[in-house]
Image (tube, helix red, strand yellow):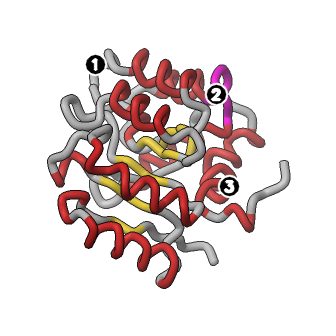
Amino acid sequence: QRLRWLCRVDPWQGAAAVVEARRGMEELGAAGLYLDPWEENFQVNDSIVYPLIEEARRCGKPVLLNAGHVRVSHPTQVRDLASRFPDVQFVASNGGQINISGILQAEARRMLEACPNVCIETAGTYRQDYLEEIATEVGVDRVLFASGSPHYDQEFELARVALAKLGDDLKARLRSGNAMAVYAPDHRPSW
């Protein structure tokens, strides 16, 4: 099975969101939970999300966060959440930051260094050297390919990994191996 999907719920729905997350992950086969604090207007480290994170933990599933948005999912907020749930695997979209100036890259890196249970996605990451540094200095297993479709151009996102100054074995891990390890651990590649 090459296609994996995530269950997206709105934390503002309270207990109903937890029930739906459980149904998605247990009954329908979702590979994890997706939370979007930008679109649903909540701070990612607010206690409103804790019951959902606890449900993902109970199901043994990762949590993808729409990350990098100032006010709702700044790297320091993701770090706070991940620190509260060290046994849950978190994936921060947008390289953990989406500031085109690159100012938040240092915060995102500190988040990764402080929280071994957080990895980042490649989509929309403006600086190629940032991804290369995270892969080589923090850990290649901490970077997952993401297309960001339909918001980002898929060919460009694929080229982002193809053109990275990394060995072919590391690029293979970024392209698919790391995502398989997070979202399909039963099919985890052997390195």
Q: Where is residue 115 in the image (x, y as percent from the top left)?
A: 55, 29
Magenta stretch: dominant secondary structure: helix
Which comes before the other along the chain, label 3 or label 1? 1
Q: Residues within 10 Å of mark 2 (few under 14, many from 20)?
A: some
Tell me what residue is drawn at x 33 percent, y 65 percent.
Answer: 8
Residue 168, percent from left and from top: 74, 41
Residue at image position (43%, 35%) is: 95
In the rendered image, which quarter is residue 167 located in? Answer: top right
Q: Which residue matches tag 3?
A: 181
Please provide the residue range marked out in magenta: 135-140
Query: In the visual, does 64 lie left or right of 49?
Result: right
What's the residue type where badge 1 is placed?
Ser
Circles 3 and 2, Cβ within 8 Å, touching? The answer is: no
Residue 47 visible in the current orientation: yes
Residue 138 among those drawn in magenta:
yes
* Residue tagged 2: 165
Q: Is residue 104 above or below residue 26?
A: above
Query: Vertically, is 124 above or below 186?
Result: above
Query: Which label lies toward us, 3 or 1?
Result: 3
Dot 3 lies on which element?
helix
Give the foreground label among 2 and 1: 1
Q: Do the residues labelled 2 and 1 touch (CB within 8 Å)?
A: no
Q: Badges 3 and 1: C-beta atoms under 8 Å apart?
A: no
Specify which label sits upstream in the sequence, 3 or 2: 2
Does dot 1 land on a helix, a strand or a loop?
Answer: loop
Residue on which the image places disc 1: 101
Residue toward you, 159 or 111: 111
